Image: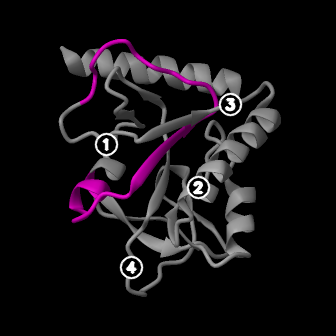
């Protein structure tokens, strides 16, 4: 039963985000990235996980480019089987599974991330992530032996007043929207 509610909620959020992403996206991206920068200035992470944005997600590429000029190490997901591993952000990017862009694989030892900026489709009443339904972020964070600060981002908040998540779904420390 909960599965149907979660799936329906996910579909309605995606529709809403696709609609929202056509209007004022540039403005909302800038506003949200500015808020993310405030958190970065407070926490001063040495290693940060970001993501390569898809159309309806907050465009964090300007932030990635800014951070690369500092001493902050920027990592992005690189899909491996049912989850992902961290790779340094670098060009060129290649379109991979699910239409997600990734840099080339790297074989460097992964550093411990201090802060993770994670895109969401929606959140439930417990501020747990509703993503695209593949569970990659959930598996990634479950396999870590520590917990970084997790910040969810979304162009427009899409929050359910019901518990839709499973026990293994990741929970935000903060949610940033425009």
Q: Is residue 19 shown above or below 161? A: below
Instruction: Provide residue 42's location: percent of width, then percent of height.
Output: 58, 55
Instruction: Provide residue 58's location: percent of width, then percent of height.
Output: 65, 42
User: What's the mark number on residue 42?
Assistant: 2
- Magenta stretch: give its range: 139-165
- For residue 103: magenta? no
User: What's the mark number on residue 66?
Assistant: none
- Distance between the Cα atoms at labels 4 and 2? 24 Å
- Distance between the Cα atoms at labels 4 and 3? 31 Å
Tell me the colour scheme of the image: one colour
The residue lying at 21 percent from left, 18 percent from top is 2
User: What's the mark number on residue 170?
Assistant: 1
- Distance between the Cα atoms at labels 2 and 3? 19 Å
Q: Earlier in the sequence, mark 1 or mark 3?
A: 1
Q: Is residue 145 left or right of residue 174?
A: left
Q: Mark 1–mark 2 contact, CB under 8 Å?
A: no
Q: Earlier in the sequence, mark 2 or mark 3?
A: 2
The residue lying at 67 percent from left, 43 percent from top is 35
Question: Residue at label 3?
Answer: 178
């Amino acid at each position: 039963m909960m599965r149907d509610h979660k799936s329906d909620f996910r579909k309605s959020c995606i529709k809403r985000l696709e609609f929202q992403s056509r209007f004022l996206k540039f403005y909302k991206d800038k506003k949200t990235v500015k808020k993310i920068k405030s958190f970065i200035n407070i926490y001063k992470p040495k290693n940060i996980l970001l993501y390569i944005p898809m159309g309806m997600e907050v465009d964090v590429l300007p932030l990635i480019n800014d951070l690369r000029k500092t001493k902050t190490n920027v990592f992005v997901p690189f899909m491996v089987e049912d989850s992902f591993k961290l790779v340094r952000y670098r060009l060129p990017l290649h379109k991979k599974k699910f239409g997600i862009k990734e840099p080339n694989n790297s074989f460097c030892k992964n550093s411990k991330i201090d802060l993770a900026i994670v895109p969401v489709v929606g959140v439930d009443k417990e501020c747990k992530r509703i993503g695209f339904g593949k569970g990659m972020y959930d598996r990634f964070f479950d396999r870590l032996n520590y917990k970084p600060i997790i910040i969810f981002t979304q162009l427009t908040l899409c929050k359910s007043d019901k518990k839709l998540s499973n026990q293994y779904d990741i929970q935000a420390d903060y949610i940033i929207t425009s």
